[in-house]
């Protein structure tokens, strides 16, 4: 197996990020190192202020590293962004209220030079993928919070990005909707084979979704532990009652308690 075959989707080496204000310098991340294999699902878990969202933004080329390096798909984050290899889903669906669901998904085709779709799924196919067939012509105010996030995910998948970055996309949803979307996201990940980095404050969500969980400690943000999730790739919510899941969740809780 050659080096190109085994190259990770994301590789951070001694990554540090500092923000300088008029009053002080804040270290958001310090000496962070980890790899993410292509096609993997990584959950980022940690207390508020540990730099989870900052790390996601470094990968997305929205924040620059102060020290160290972040390699994305064999190049720089800027190269990955310019080549449209990244998709981003925020906590707020950020849909344009005057555009229908399908028109919101089509938006990346119209801005910044547009996306060369090639043989990748169409907006209509992506809405079907996220379970919104029949809702294509609905406006955001006609959709529930969970449905709006599905539109946001479909929009982020337009152009078949190789990496999907998700910053607490289900954090504002009720527990029932959140559980349902967790299962849907696993299905979408398995169908698309996209590498996913998923930020969450929820121990159960991190363990249920991730193949690995990167636990970050705060002040400054740093790696506490990379935890392998030894569960089947195909999961449903019932797995959270299993002894292995309970053990994993207890370990993650203990790690957070020592952060």
Image (cartoon, rainbow, N blue to C red):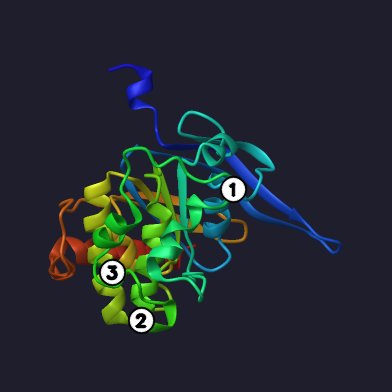
Question: Is residue 19 shown left or right of residue 240?
Answer: right
Q: Are marks 3 and 1 in contact (CB under 8 Å)?
A: no
Task: Name the N-terminal-most of marks 3 and 1.
Answer: 1
Q: Are marks 2 and 3 in contact (CB under 8 Å)?
A: no
- Residue under label 2: 144
Name the disc covering residue 112, or none.
Answer: 1
Real-space CA distance between mark 2 and mark 1, rounded to the nearest whole angstrom? 29 Å
Name the disc covering residue 140, or none.
Answer: none
The image quadrant where one finds the N terminus is: top left
Q: Examine the image and state in which quarter residue 174 appears.
A: bottom left
- SS label for mark 2: loop
Real-space CA distance between mark 3 and mark 1, rounded to the nearest whole angstrom? 30 Å
Q: Is residue 163 above or below residue 259?
A: above
Q: Compare residues 17 and 132 and report the one nearer the observer.
A: 132
Residue 213 horizontal/vertical position (percent): 36, 53
Q: Is residue 229 above or below residue 200?
A: above
Q: Residue at x 17, y 60 (%)?
A: 244
């Amino acid at each position: 197996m050659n080096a190109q075959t085994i190259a990770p989707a994301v590789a951070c080496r001694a990554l540090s990020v500092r923000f300088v204000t008029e009053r002080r310098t804040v270290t958001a991340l310090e000496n962070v190192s980890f790899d993410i294999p292509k096609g993997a699902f990584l959950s980022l878990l940690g207390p508020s202020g540990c730099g989870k969202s900052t790390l996601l933004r470094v990968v997305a080329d929205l924040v620059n590293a102060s020290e160290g390096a972040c390699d994305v798909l064999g190049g720089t984050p800027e190269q990955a962004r310019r080549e449209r290899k990244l998709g981003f889903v925020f906590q707020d669906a950020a849909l344009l209220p005057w555009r229908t669901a399908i028109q919101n998904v089509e938006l990346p085709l119209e801005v910044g030079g547009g996306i060369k779709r090639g043989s990748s799924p169409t907006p209509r196919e992506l809405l079907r993928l996220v379970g919104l067939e029949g809702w294509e012509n609905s406006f955001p105010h006609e959709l529930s919070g969970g449905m709006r996030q599905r539109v946001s995910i479909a929009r982020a998948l337009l152009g078949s990005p190789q990496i999907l970055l998700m910053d607490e996309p289900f954090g504002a949803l009720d527990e029932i909707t959140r559980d349902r979307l967790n299962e849907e996201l696993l299905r979408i990940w398995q169908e698309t084979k996209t590498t996913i980095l998923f930020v969450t404050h929820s121990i159960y969500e991190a363990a249920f979704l991730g193949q690995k969980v990167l636990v970050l400690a705060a002040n400054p943000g740093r790696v506490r532990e990379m935890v392998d999730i030894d569960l089947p790739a195909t999961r449903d919510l019932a797995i959270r009652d299993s002894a292995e899941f309970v053990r994993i969740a207890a370990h993650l809780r203990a790690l957070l308690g020592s952060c």
